[in-house]
Image: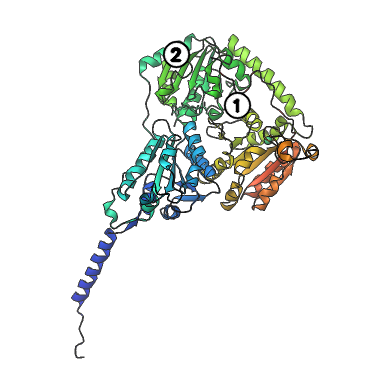
């Protein structure tokens, strides 16, 4: 037994206590790297989705994001990832992140960042960048990224220490969603991603930012002035923009406002569905007449930019009065003097205005209303004639007929992109609830389609399972981001894409004419042409989705019903339409050049 040490119970307890102390010391001194600090802050601040393409130096950020419970979606092109993040922010009201590599990866997001800022949609782009000690030495993919982002973003910043990360993340959230929303850029030097802090308790995390920004309303006196102007108007028109879709209670409050005042209304493309397109007060088919002859427009969360022809003649009356409602004071008096500027949240403001109007209703049997209705009816007849013409190859309106029918029977989140495909789609596809239409938007960006579709797909999967995602694109628009079909396959999203294929940008040439092109194609193929009747449906199949080639109205109808039965992965319906199909004749070109 000699020197055998008898371990007493008390010794054992001491040893265990010692172990426990060491363990807890280790825990409180938990080391942590920049990637994990960043991911933890994003999660704490409420980020749910991250779209990106990883590579040096941010692979670890993507991995850390997943470890902290953020849903990571690996895309094929940074632009699409950026479009997806901003659409997700718009749909959920919570900023999503776009994660990209240094240099070219980050620069590929610039069009997306500008698109988000111009649309007033929140998002955070995080770009990896050269290690700080290699800066100005020709570091790998070195570029002035913060400066590059600044023009396209509301705000851009770069933490230079691990301790600074929480403050930068909270500010990024705040800057992109408070006030007028927009894009924010956060630069993450490679050395910061991997460097570690010995003791996590040295990091001061910032408490989560409330994601519903504070709301303001105009003072009562100015609301009273607006009420007087409304009561005096002979030919008033309410114009509903996408600020109304963004406003938290905007859609309900605007619908109540329209119902109680009985004012005729128009929606901008982004404002569609705030008040249902099927509401009898909608004068959408009489748009040109309504804006030209209105003596008062109540502009609810819309800008007098190119989409609304600057509010100027020849499209608007030169004496038109404007009651403008916006959260951004700098927007008032843009292009046209604001008769009454109402600074505040659009929903809350119209609610107060409705009370101020105290039961006032616009006379539905007035000359103005009768004129608008007569003009709507006339334009509807012209469109109906084109819709009913099912001659092959189809014209746009006929191709849209079964799509419209499908939308009226289902809850659909529409992504619509192209030239004629989008313009005609806006009038042919009704929206009955808000934020159910995503299109090229304020910046007129082509290439947003499949990025938006991915966001829509995840949004529906996680928040609105009964809603179907339907993308309707021109063949040219599809081409900008077609490879994202593979992403959609990978994440098993049941997204249906209809391509209205006219073999070109605006319009191409068909296979017969194509055969007649002789000589050097670089000089002889029309600049608008793409491959005639290209089989994009086969591309979708090759990537693991479903593809259908169709030509006629019954075929489109059948394809749409079949497509959603697949339940998983994308379906691409390739609709061959006439290369010479055009929009209904318009009195003015879509882009009214300013003469003033
Ligand atoms: P549209 O494309 O529908 O015309 P815009 O994006 O041009 O819409 O304009 C939207 C306007 O709405 C912007 O000027 C923006 O500042 C404003 N806006 C955004 N959110 C709100 C809100 N909650 N209340 C009031 N205005 C808002
Ligand atoms: Mg085309």
Which of label 1 and label 2 is nearer to you?
A: 2
At x 79% / y 36%, what residue is drawn?
513
Which sits in the foreground, 595 or 272? Answer: 595
Q: Position of residue 431 (x, y in %)?
A: 58, 31
| Quadrant assignment for the N terminus | bottom left
How was the colour assigned to the protein in this rendering?
A: rainbow
Mark 2 within 8 Å of ligand 1, using the beta carbon: no
Q: Residues within 10 Å of mark 1 (few under 14, many from 20)?
A: few
Give the residue furthest to the front.
Answer: 137
In the rendered image of this protein, does residue 450 appear above or below residue 316?
Answer: below
Above-or-below relation of 186 to 68: above
Residue 340 position, x and y percent, is 43, 15
- Indicate which disc residue 339 carries: 2
Q: Could you tell me if residue 458 is visible in this image?
A: yes
* Res. 128 mark: none
Count of numbered marks: 2
The image shows residue 29 at horizontal and vertical percentages of 27, 59
Name which of mark 1 and mark 2 comes first in the sequence: 1
Residue 331, x across and y down, in percent: 44, 23
Left or right position of 287 against 534? left
How far, Cα to Cα, is label 1 from label 2? 30 Å
The quarter holding residue 498 reads top right
Crowd band around label 2 with a 10 angstrom C-alpha radius: few (<14), some (14–19), many (20+)? some
The secondary element bearing badge 2 is classed as loop
Label 1 residue near ligand 1, CB within 8 Å? no
Q: Name the mark on residue 278.
A: 1
User: Considering depth in this image, is 585 or 341 the residue closer to the camera?
Assistant: 585
**Camera-side residue of 235 and 135:** 135
Q: Residue furthest bottom?
A: 1
Which quadrant of the figure has residue 389?
A: top right
Left or right, 381 with reference to 290: right
Q: Is residue 311 above or below residue 208?
A: above
């Amino acid at each position: 037994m000699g020197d055998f040490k008898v371990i007493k119970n008390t010794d054992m307890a001491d040893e265990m206590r010692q172990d426990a102390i060491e363990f807890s010391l280790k825990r409180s001194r938990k080391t942590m790297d920049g990637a994990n600090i960043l991911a933890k802050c994003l999660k704490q601040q409420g980020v749910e989705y991250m779209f990106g393409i990883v590579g040096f130096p941010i692979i670890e950020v993507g991995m850390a994001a997943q470890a902290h419970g953020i849903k990571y979606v690996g895309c094929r092109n940074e632009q699409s990832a950026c479009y997806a993040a901003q659409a997700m922010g718009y749909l959920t009201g919570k900023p999503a992140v776009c994660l990209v590599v240094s240099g070219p990866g980050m620069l590929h997001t610039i069009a997306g960042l500008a698109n988000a800022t111009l649309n007033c949609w929140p998002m955070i782009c995080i770009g990896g960048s050269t290690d700080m000690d290699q800066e100005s030495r020709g570091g790998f993919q070195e570029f002035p990224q913060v400066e590059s982002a600044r023009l396209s973003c509301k705000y851009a910043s770069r933490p230079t220490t691990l301790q600074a990360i929480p403050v930068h993340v909270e500010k990024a959230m705040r800057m992109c969603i408070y006030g007028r929303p927009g894009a924010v850029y956060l630069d993450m030097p490679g050395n910061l991603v991997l460097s570690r802090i010995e003791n996590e308790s040295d990091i001061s995390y910032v408490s989560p930012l409330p994601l519903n920004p504070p709301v303001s309303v105009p003072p009562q006196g100015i609301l009273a002035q607006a009420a007087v102007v409304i009561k005096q108007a002979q030919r008033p028109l309410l114009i509903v923009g996408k600020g109304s879709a963004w406003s938290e209670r905007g859609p309900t409050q605007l619908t109540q406002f329209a119902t109680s005042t009985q004012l005729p209304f128009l929606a901008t493309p982004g404002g569609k569905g705030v008040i249902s397109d099927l509401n009898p007060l909608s004068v959408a088919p009489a748009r040109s007449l309504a804006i030209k002859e209105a003596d008062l427009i109540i502009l609810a969360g819309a800008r007098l930019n190119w989409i609304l022809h600057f509010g100027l003649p020849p499209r608007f009356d030169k004496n038109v009065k404007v009651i403008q409602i916006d959260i951004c004071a700098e927007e008032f008096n843009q292009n046209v003097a604001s008769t009454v500027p109402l600074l505040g949240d659009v929903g809350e403001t119209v609610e107060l205005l409705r009370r101020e109007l105290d039961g006032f209703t616009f006379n539905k049997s007035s000359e103005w209303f009768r004129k608008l209705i007569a003009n709507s009816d006339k334009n509807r007849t012209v469109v109906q004639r084109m819709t009913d013409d099912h001659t092959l190859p189809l014209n746009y309106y006929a191709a849209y007929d079964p799509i419209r029918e499908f939308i009226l029977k289902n809850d659909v989140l529409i992504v619509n992109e192209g030239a004629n495909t989008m313009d005609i789609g806006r009038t042919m596809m009704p929206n009955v609830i808000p934020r159910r239409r995503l299109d090229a938007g304020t910046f007129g960006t082509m290439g947003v389609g499949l990025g938006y579709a991915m966001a829509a797909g995840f949004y529906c999967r996680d928040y609105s399972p009964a809603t179907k995602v339907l993308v309707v694109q021109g063949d040219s628009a599809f081409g900008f981001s077609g490879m994202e079909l593979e992403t959609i396959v990978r994440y098993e999203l049941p997204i249906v894409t209809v391509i209205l294929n006219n073999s070109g940008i605006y319009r191409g040439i068909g296979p017969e004419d194509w055969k007649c092109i002789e000589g050097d194609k670089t000089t002889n193929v029309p600049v608008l042409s793409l491959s005639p009747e290209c089989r994009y449906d086969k591309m979708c199949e090759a990537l693991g989705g479903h593809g259908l080639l169709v030509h006629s109205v019954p075929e489109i109808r059948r394809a749409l019903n079949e497509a959603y039965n697949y339940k998983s992965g994308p379906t691409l319906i390739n609709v061959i339409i006439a290369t010479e199909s055009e929009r209904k004749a318009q009195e003015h070109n879509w882009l009214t050049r300013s003469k003033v």
